[in-house]
């Protein structure tokens, strides 16, 4: 009796196909008049699209079966209220880029013209606590990346004790260095803590200019809301942007500062003046052996500049350009035998090793003469690095690369010897950086 009554009163448990056809017909007509439609049956929403999808029906077939007229019983049609306008917010990427641009205008990586004041500012930065803080944080991130958690934590704690020094007006270069450090050895915890801490410290003390505070705030927001990979991409964009502001060129392409990889391959006790001079000029690969650096006293050492240019050229061409070998051999030949510039010597040997290994791509590493010569040159580069560098990550990474190449060639004995040497040098690095 109840079922009979419900049918007579037009109460149904589920939507009927005939009713949905009529709703679809009404929805189309209202849409033609510019009206949206929502339907409710016995107080519950009716999703016409979902019904059609679930039943595997076609709109056209349903419209043919529709009977225009009044709405089916117990179904109501309403025009939904307009959506409230949302608060318009620029994407976080855009906010970061804008904040970085405004800050970099006042604190350029490179001024339009070189002068003594700029070099003096660089000298002050390299002698400041900010330089030390960045070095400690970089080494801490590196140790985390190779699984040395206790040692890495020790370095990072020491770095954070003085990390506020990067907010000093004379140490704005430290911001560029930090962007590079957390890009090369990414750690989400370090990123979040670093930007949040600097933001809070700057606001609390009032020592930071407004533009830098805004930049740090956007960095903190990125680190909280986005993936590590996305954040690294944005940090790399910032360094690349700074390197292209002066319209520098390298071998016919816009100069890309980020191609100095690894950035901190230069020994810590060497001047970084040339690194900032790099994006001031137009460089040609063929002239690397004769490239010179501006110096206020007219006595600049061009060897570090030439080394960096060769690294950039190699990374730019994936070490596949035949000119790399020629350039490296010319510079090795012209070095004074009694006192060769060790950074340039290392880079020339490093470049020859990479070029030869790239040349034997797709060949059997165990029988390839190019691969054997590549390992020989990399071994020589390691020997130069062992004399010129303090124990640390660059030496560790070169030894790791040599171990990998030995394994490619099937030389397990040489790989084990290299690995043992690498681990010993890694242990030396833990204490040396606190002196």
Image: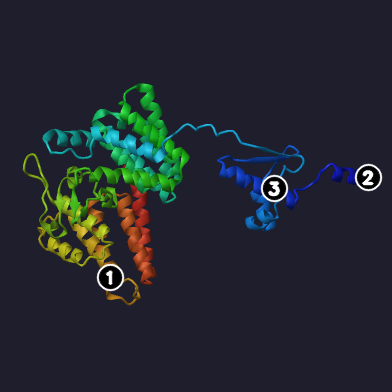
Question: Mark 2 or mark 1: which comes first in sequence?
Answer: 2
Residue occupying the far bottom of the picture: 367
In depth, the one of 245 and 392 nearer the eye is: 245
In depth, the one of 293 and 407 nearer the eye is: 293
Give the residue pinned by disc 1: 359
Mark identifier at residue 336: none
Spatial CA distance of label 3 from label 2 is: 32 Å
Q: Where, quadrant-wise, is the C terminus in this rendering?
A: top left
Give the residue pinned by disc 2: 1
Please name which of the two marks, 1 or 3, marks the residue nearer to the observer: 3
Where disc 3 sits, the SS reads: loop
Q: Position of residue 149 (x, y in %)?
A: 45, 45
Q: Residue at x 31, y 29 (%)?
A: 211
Callout 2 crowding tier (Cα within 10 Å): few <14, some 14–19, many ≥20:
few
In depth, the one of 39 and 72 nearer the eye is: 72
Question: Mark 3 or mark 2: which comes first in sequence?
Answer: 2
Q: Position of residue 404 (x, y in %)?
A: 37, 64
Spatial CA distance of label 1 from label 3 is: 76 Å
């Amino acid at each position: 009796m109840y079922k009979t009554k419900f049918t007579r009163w037009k109460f149904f448990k589920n939507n009927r196909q005939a009713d949905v056809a009529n709703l679809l017909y009404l929805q189309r007509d209202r849409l033609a008049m510019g009206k949206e439609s929502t339907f409710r049956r016995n107080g519950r929403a009716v999703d016409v699209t979902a019904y059609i999808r679930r039943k595997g029906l076609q709109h056209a077939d349903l419209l043919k079966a529709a009977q225009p007229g009044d709405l089916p019983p117990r179904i109501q049609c309403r025009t939904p209220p307009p959506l409230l306008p949302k608060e318009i917010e620029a994407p976080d990427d855009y906010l970061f880029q804008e904040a970085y641009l405004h800050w970099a205008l006042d604190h350029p990586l490179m001024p339009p013209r070189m002068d003594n004041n700029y070099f003096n500012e660089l000298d002050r930065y390299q002698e400041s606590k900010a330089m030390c803080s960045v070095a400690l944080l970089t080494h801490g991130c590196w140790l985390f990346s190779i699984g040395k958690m206790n040692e890495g934590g020790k370095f990072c704690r020491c770095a954070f004790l003085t990390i506020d020094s990067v907010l000093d007006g004379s140490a704005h270069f430290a911001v560029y260095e930090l962007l590079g450090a957390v890009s090369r050895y990414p750690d989400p915890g370090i990123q979040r803590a670093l930007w949040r801490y600097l933001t809070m410290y700057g606001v609390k003390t009032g020592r930071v200019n407004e533009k830098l505070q805004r930049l740090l705030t956007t960095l903190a927001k990125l680190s909280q809301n986005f993936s590590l990979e996305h954040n690294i991409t944005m940090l790399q964009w910032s360094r690349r942007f700074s390197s292209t502001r002066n319209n520098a060129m390298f071998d016919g392409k816009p100069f890309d500062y980020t191609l100095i990889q690894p950035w901190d391959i230069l020994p810590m006790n060497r001047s970084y003046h040339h690194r900032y001079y790099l994006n001031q000029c137009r460089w040609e690969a063929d002239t690397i052996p004769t490239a010179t650096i501006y110096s206020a006293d007219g006595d600049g050492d061009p060897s570090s500049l030439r080394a960096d240019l060769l690294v950039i050229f190699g990374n730019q061409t994936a070490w596949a350009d035949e000119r790399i070998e020629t350039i490296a051999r010319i510079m090795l030949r012209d070095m004074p035998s009694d006192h060769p510039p060790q950074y340039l010597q290392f880079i020339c040997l490093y470049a020859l090793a990479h070029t030869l290994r790239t040349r034997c791509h797709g060949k059997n590493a165990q029988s390839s003469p190019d691969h054997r010569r590549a390992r020989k040159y990399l071994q020589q580069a390691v020997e130069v690095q062992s004399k010129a560098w303090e124990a640390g990550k660059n030496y560790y990474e070169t030894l790791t690369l040599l171990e990998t190449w030995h394994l490619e060639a099937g030389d397990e004995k040489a790989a084990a010897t290299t690995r043992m040497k690498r681990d010993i040098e890694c242990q030396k690095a833990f204490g040396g950086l606190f002196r």
